Amino acid sequence: MEKKNIDWSNLSFGYIKTDKRYVSNFKDGKWDEGALIDDDMITMSECACVLQYSQSVFEGLKAYTTEQGHTVVFRPDLNADRMATSAKRMEMPVFPEDKFIDAVEQVVRANIAYVPPYGTGATLYLRPFMFGSNPVIGVKPANEFQFRIFATPVGPYFKGGAKPITIKVSDFDRAAPNGTGFIKAGLNYAMSLHAIVTAHKEGFDENMYLDAATRTKVEETGGANFLFVTKDNKVVTPKSNSILPSITRRSLMIVAKEYLGLEVEEREVYFDEVKDFAECGLCGTAAVISPVGKIYDHGKEICFPSGMDAMGPVTKQLYDTLTGIQMGRIEDRFGWVRVIE
């Protein structure tokens, strides 16, 4: 199919309405068949549970054009699984994994003209989400829900390459022990908005959140997991039951071990040891890896040896290998890439 007349190389990371989106409704204890629709507007009661009590969960993944010209998505089964975990924690019905993957494929096929060509740096971003749709005035879960997926073409997260960013240790807490930090619920992101706006006003790109109980251990940022590299090239990521299990981070750890032959470790990371790491990055769907050059901690600076000019060498290897797998330049040993014909 002929591609849309879009300036792919100058796309921002923002929303553009595409032709089709997928909608399925849960009522009387079951999901309907679901369908692709044209209308991007949602009509609901002013008393809908999502509006009153923020009962919502979401996911994010991308469709790419590979070097061979195939349209693909990356590990959608993990998005389906993570959304199921989120739904259970939020007292929402699980959208079945097979239906989730089928819906993803339907949305990509229906909007294939919006999948950017290979080499532009752009991708088709997919946003599955679910919310409580019926009126609820007492504090309780909804009993009717809507699951949707929309697509929007987006430009590369970093224009002109990924330059290391500066982050600050936040005075705010992201998630409490035994809370909802391990799921992808809208409420987790709502509480981070003030913190990120504050960080930007102070001249920083992001926040580093520490654990709420002791404020001694590294957790994550508002929307990405941390990845550290030691001076002897071991790749380390923080472990906590209040960290969202990033699909990108989990994939990078396998890439580090199986493709690059590096030692990897997922463990508690104490903030006191951060100064001893050689490299630091933030892992997520949008940017894959955002290199961190400097951390500001209440008047003190931690400057990584990798510097502020470019990604560190190990981080760059990880980035190049994972994006190479996604784009078809490197062999996909584990069947992560799903071709959509």
Image (spheres, rainbow, N blue to C red):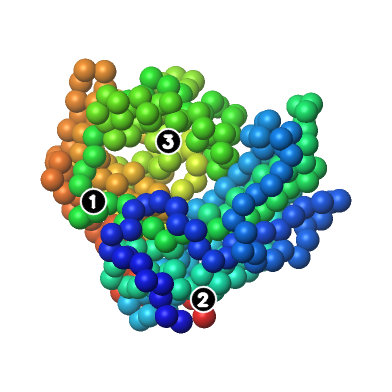
The residue shown at (21%, 17%) is 299
Q: Is residue 90 left or right of residue 262?
A: right
Quadrant assignment, res 135: top right
Q: Which residue is mark 3?
A: 222
Q: Which structural element holds mark 2?
A: loop
Vertical placement of residue 221 versus 326, above or below: above
Quadrant assignment, res 251: bottom left
The residue shown at (62%, 59%) is 39
Q: Which structural element holds mark 1?
A: loop
Q: Position of residue 50 (x, y in %)?
A: 67, 37
Task: Indicate which disc, 2 or 3, sits on the residue closer to the N terminus.
Answer: 3
Q: Position of residue 320 (x, y in %)?
A: 27, 62
Vertical placement of residue 201 versus 189, above or below: above
Query: In front here: 105 or 236?
Result: 105
Vertical placement of residue 51 versus 158, above or below: above
Query: In front here: 31 or 271?
Result: 31
Q: Is residue 126 left or right of residue 146?
A: left
Instruction: Give the residue type at disc 3.
Output: Gly
The residue shown at (20%, 47%) is 163
Query: How many angstroms separate mark 2 from mark 1 (CA)?
Result: 29 Å
Instruction: Give the residue type at disc 1.
Output: Ala
Mark 2 burial class by Cα count in 10 Å: few <14, some 14-19, many 20+: some
Q: Position of residue 69 (x, y in %)?
A: 38, 80
Task: Name the disc covering residue 147, or none.
Answer: none
Q: Which residue is mark 2?
A: 340
Query: How many angstroms separate mark 3 from mark 1 (CA)?
Result: 19 Å
Task: Name the disc covering residue 162, or none.
Answer: 1
Q: Position of residue 155 (x, y in %)?
A: 34, 58
Residue 276 visible in the shown view: no
Task: Indicate which disc, 3 or 1, sits on the residue closer to the N terminus.
Answer: 1
Instruction: Give the residue type at disc 2.
Output: Ile
